[in-house]
Amino acid sequence: MPDMSGKNGIITGAGGGIGRASALAFASAGANVMIMDIAAEPLEETARLIREAGGTVETMVGDASDEDFAAQMVARTVELWETLDFAHNNAGIGTAATPFTQQERAMWDRVFTLNVFGTMSFMKHELRQMEKQGFGAIVNTSSMSGKNGSPGLSPYNASKWALNGMTQTAALEYAEQGIRVNAICPGATFTAALAAWKDSSPREYEGYTSAIPMKRAAEPREQADAAVWLCSAEAGYVTGTLLNVDGGEGILGKQ
């Protein structure tokens, strides 16, 4: 694990899944973490786990699609710890598989409001602070769905393609200023949603995971470890990268 001692950062969507794992991983590496989620109870559970392990954490409950909240979170982090060294913009939502002709505009609006505009708002205020400092690293949670088509998931896929474009554009714009911007692109990850699918449809779940070259879903911690590495000095020459963390799933059929 990279050493993040003395580093200060933000993790969004930290109430569970990859976000909780990321908060725990950054804190375990020595970082001070400001974490947020829209739901207070799971967020406080993440904070409890961090404090129990001896880490430093502060929480803010709010809506990750609200730009004012994003600005407040960055300002609060700097007020407490003086610098914003890293950010993991993880908050996002998916949709149930729905044929394209049956998708409603409201579904697209809901997904883009959080996955695209929410991430954009956080990036905007994070980059402003990092620009003042002359350093910083951002990692966004994208998806393999941002590189490949997934039938029935057009709103989600399109939002992650947009996120990848924002990531690489920001990487180019701010590289000379010592700011790195990357994304992780998770494949199947054993979050609560995947666990529920396994319980309700075990045969379908086993069929899906058996087709992954590594024959399993990722653990949230494996996604978090990639995020920590991308924000660390060990990845100091890495920017604009859309890092597959997918057990080889993304290269199926590309040999």
Image: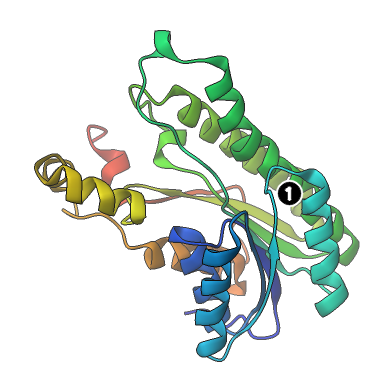
Instruction: Please indicate whether residue 22 sits to the left or right of residue 233 in the image.
Output: left
The answer to whether any part of residue 63 appears in the image is: yes
Residue 123 place in picture, x, y as percent: 73, 49
Compare residues 35 and 41 and report the one nearer the observer. 41
Secondary structure category for the residue under label 1: helix
Quarter of the image for residue 108 reads top right
Instruction: Please indicate whether residue 117 sits to the left or right of residue 135 in the image.
Output: left
- Crowding around mark 1 (Cα neighbors within 10 Å: few <14, some 14 to 19, many 20+) is many
Quarter of the image for residue 98 reads top left
Residue flagged by tag 1: what amino acid is it?
Met
**Farthest residue, direction top:** 101
Quadrant placement of the C terminus = top left
Q: Is residue 199 above or below residue 132?
A: above
Tell me the residue at 12%/46% (across/down): 202
Q: Is residue 68 above or below residue 11?
A: above
**Farthest residue, direction right:** 132
Tell me the residue at 47%/35% (across/down): 146
Residue 143 place in picture, x, y as percent: 45, 42
> Label 1: which residue?
123
Tell me the residue at 55%/50% (across/down): 183
